[in-house]
Amino acid sequence: MIRFLAACVVLTCVSTVAFAEDKPVLKAPVGLQLYSLRTQFQLEGVHKTLDRVKDLGFKYVELAGTYNTPPEKFKAMLDERGLTPIAGHFAWDRFKSDTDGIAAEAKALGLQYAGTAWVKGNEPFDEKYCREVAATFNKAGKALSEKGLKFYYHIHGYEFVPYGDGTLFDLLVKETDPKYVSFEMDILWVVYPGQDPAKLLEKYPDRFCFTHLKDLRKGVKTGALTGNTDVRNDVTLGTGQVDYPAVFAAAARTDVKYHFIEDESPTVLTQLPKSLKFLEQFKE
């Protein structure tokens, strides 16, 4: 009987240790994509909105514009609140002809990365256009690299058109130089087209520099390649369709450097604190 109890204790201890080792953890820091608060920037102004970001406890931010504020002034306002700008989104067309301008603005903002989040125009995202986009990425990435910056592309869902044994996203990865081009995985925009974000991270462990943490409302049909869905389908992290334990387990084994929460919903102010609370369970 004593031996039996001792064995049970040992098994329990081993099981507990195994569970602790297997628990997904957030290896990379969590920041905020400021676009989440675009309405607040417009209605409340930059000062008050950045105060909100600080009060929520964020230390790192990703930018998508400066809301009519000069870059140097915007950077100073971030500094005043202890907010570190890591990366920023810029208009796609500027990467075709104005990398010098992007670099100057990014430097003034103190960014390490300059990227874009939408390359789809009126033309279909087909093989021909995918190759053209890849060529522009390589050229822009090289030019930014010479200025001490890194280029990245935020995938948006329409890249998963079937192609060969995979998708056009696979072609985009293949055709871009990893020295100059990285990717940002918006989790919702992988799930919405019917893809698996954990498997995609595992497939390309050294190509994603960031993620956008975003959840898709339960019941929303997946499989569309439009890159568009109602912003009300952005829900509190952990309440939607995304398997975040699997995502974080996979991300921990990759080169992902930052996770940025992006919540485009009209109820972002109530959802953000809940999303942060959800993420607490994955901290080391």
Image (cartoon, rainbow, N blue to C red):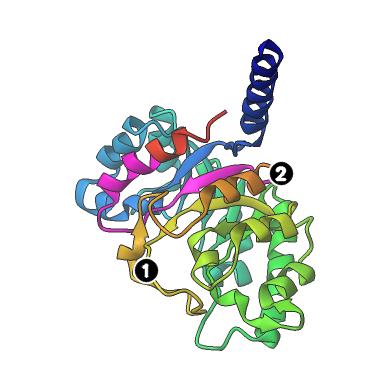
Q: Where residue 236 sits: x, y (%)? A: 36, 50
Q: Where residue 163 sits: x, y (%)? A: 71, 83
* Residue that sits furthest to the front in the current view: 1
Per the image, the residue denoted by label 1 is 219
Q: Is 269 within the magenta?
A: yes
Please give the name of the residue rendered at 46% of the width and 50% of the height, measured from the top-left corner: 63
Q: Is 41 within the magenta?
A: no
| Sequence-earlier tag: 1 or 2 | 1
Q: What stretch is highlighted in magenta?
A: 254-276
Please give the name of the residue rendered at 51% of the width and 39% of the height, measured from the top-left corner: 30
Quarter of the image for residue 83 reads top left
Q: Where residue 189 sits: x, y (%)? A: 51, 66
> Disc 2 marks which amino acid?
Arg
Quarter of the image for residue 231 reads bottom left
Between the residue at mark 1 and the residue at mark 2, the CA separation in whole angstroms equals 30 Å
Determine which of the numbered discs, if any, sits on residue 253 in the image.
Answer: 2
Please give the name of the residue rendered at 29% of the width and 51% of the height, measured from the top-left corner: 268
Q: Is residue 173 left or right of residue 5?
A: right
Please give the name of the residue rendered at 65% of the width and 36% of the height, measured from the top-left corner: 22
